[in-house]
Image (cartoon, rainbow, N blue to C red):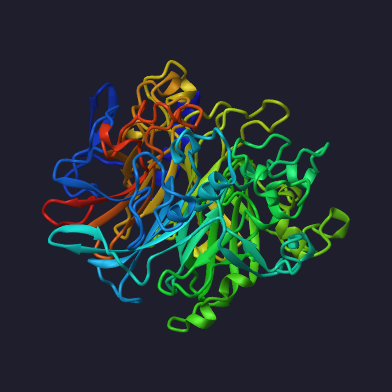
Amino acid sequence: MTFDEIIQRRLDRRQLLRGGLVTAGVTLFRSLGCPRIVAAAGGLLGFDGVGISTADRVIVPRGYVADVLYAWGDPVSDGPAFRSDASNTSDEQAVQAGMHHDGIEYFALPANGASSTHGLLAINHEYTDDGLLHPGGMEPWTPEKVRKAQAAHGVSIVEVRLEDGRWRVVRPSVYARRVTAATPIRFTGPAAGHPLLRTTADSSGLVALGTLNNCAAGRTPWGTYLTCEENFNAYFVNRAQPVPAEQRRYGITDRGLGYRWHEHDERFDAARHPHEPNRFGWIVEIDPYEPGRGPVKHTALGRFKHENAAVTVAPDGRVVVYMGDDERFEHIYKFVSRGRFDRGNDSANRRLLEDGTLYAARFDAAGGGEWVELTQGRNGLDAAAGFATQAELLVNVRRAADFVEATKMDRPEWITVDPRTRDVYCTLTNNTSRGKDGQPGPNAANPRPDNVFGHIIRWRDGGGDPTATRFRWDVFVLCGDPTHVDAGKRGTIRGDVFGSPDGLWVDRRGVLWIETDVSTNVLNRDDYARLGNNQMLAADPTTREVRRFLTGPAGCEITGVTVTPDGTTMFVNIQHPGETASERSNPSAPTAVSAWPDGASGGRPRSATVVIRKVDGGVIGA
């Protein structure tokens, strides 16, 4: 029996037990050489899928329209406009859309309402391409360019309204603002004020300066935004020899990754300021409705490369947050609040993420799993193991998860919870290093030694209760190309092919939306030669049918998705169109890969939020 047959038999058996096996009425055909599924009448997916594309534009299904709403450099409120030669100053960038849109959430106006025509968007700006951000790129490298790069990071809050059939950003707006890498942010939870968070500039250890590398996001039941600090290590350099083990565990090196902030902002010199990196890698809560209320970093949720924050409320009212640590061989986490959600009591709800229990997931070979508690004094996590306090454990939570032998996963990224079934899904984007250089080999939850295409795993906590410490899991899909010469890379997709799943979200109807992030150094080449530009797909969790909904422009990533309460408007982010394999553009040829969305006369490609609607005004995807 081949590897594919073994995996498929296991998946089919699990699905049969769940009572959801595909039945008659599903027919297969080929499009562009790729297998697709056409759903029977009345299926969950009600749109005609789009084909694979390498075009430099956004393509959506027949009967849909996609419009650019908010692009890098657009004013947040009534500030200065974007200049196509990138000559905007750092002060101007601080009141404009940042670069590289990522996670996004819609918040209806007025607060606690359900308007689908007026609301706020909270949008992450993950990182910068300094070849596009500055005239002439990084040469010469100056303090002003560092300040502008820092201003292009963080989060936007913008007010939006549907008028005369078209969405627009409301300007001016009393809600509109930017949070950047220079915004003061208060710490909460067990590590707040601990010596590991104290620096020369902040001897209290209570207030960090800025948030950066904001990747995916989440929203709380009390109407706040959770933005997640991911690859913070990229901004730090430590030229000491050797680099301390605690910093190496989070990826800090003696070279850095080319941002060069430390040259003009010494707090990013991790040798001179060894505690500054400890102030990043947290989940940050922002109230979109109250501009005067400052953001907070919640240390109780642990410090790692946070990809997401998927929030749900347990039957007993406790709040649960599922989180992925986006790096190869890292872990999946869950936080369970001590207190209970009290609808309408926002002053109490705002403290729910300050106190609770953190867990790491351990997947077993038989389809079961355990959430292992990460509390100082439990499971061997004591002073002898290097964890004298809970604060020390949370700052170095990766090492704690290693200690309790949580399962090392294939890049856990976005996590989403099905609101109807409480099933939880997690994208495992890829991992081609299993069994190499002393790394662990495949395991049941990460079954491929050369997982170039990634997979999506699914679990349900015991009794459907998110606070349970046991769960059952299965592999929802192994991504791949069914025509690949290597049988281990063909995958188990029932429908349109894709790889490197990243963004993930289940809507209220139960549709699983999947966004891809194929790295630009392999996009449309090698194993990905037949898969086209990055894309967004929709999947039926019962039949496992996958159908392509959107393809993006050249060199982009598709990321971030949210809809209005009535489901008729979808907001999706197009990140880094035109990105080169080096992830830094040539300033003398900024449109060499892409000129989206402004065209050749626009000067340079720009990340942007796109609004998608049905021409007939119906529910997206139905």
The front one of 58 and 127 is 127
Q: Is residue 360 left or right of residue 553?
A: right
Position in image of residue 619 (x %, y %) = 20, 56
- Name the residue located 65 percent from the left edge and 46 percent from the top edge: 264
Q: Is residue 517 left or right of residue 468?
A: left
Instruction: Confirm whether residue 424 shows in the render.
Output: no
Q: Is residue 187 left or right of residue 603?
A: right
Position in image of residue 506 (x %, y %) = 37, 54
Q: Is residue 188 left or right of residue 494?
A: right
Asked which quadrant contains residue 256, the reply is top right
Position in image of residue 571 (x %, y %) = 30, 53
Asked which quadrant contains residue 436, the reply is top right
The front one of 465 and 355 is 355
- Name the residue located 25 percent from the left edge and 23 percent from the top edge: 32
The outermost residue toward the right is: 384
- Name the residue located 42 percent from the left edge and 58 percent from the top edge: 95
The front one of 586 and 135 is 135
Position in image of residue 215 (x %, y %) = 50, 50
Asked which quadrant contains residue 433, the reply is top right
Instruction: Confirm whether residue 305 shows in the render.
Output: yes
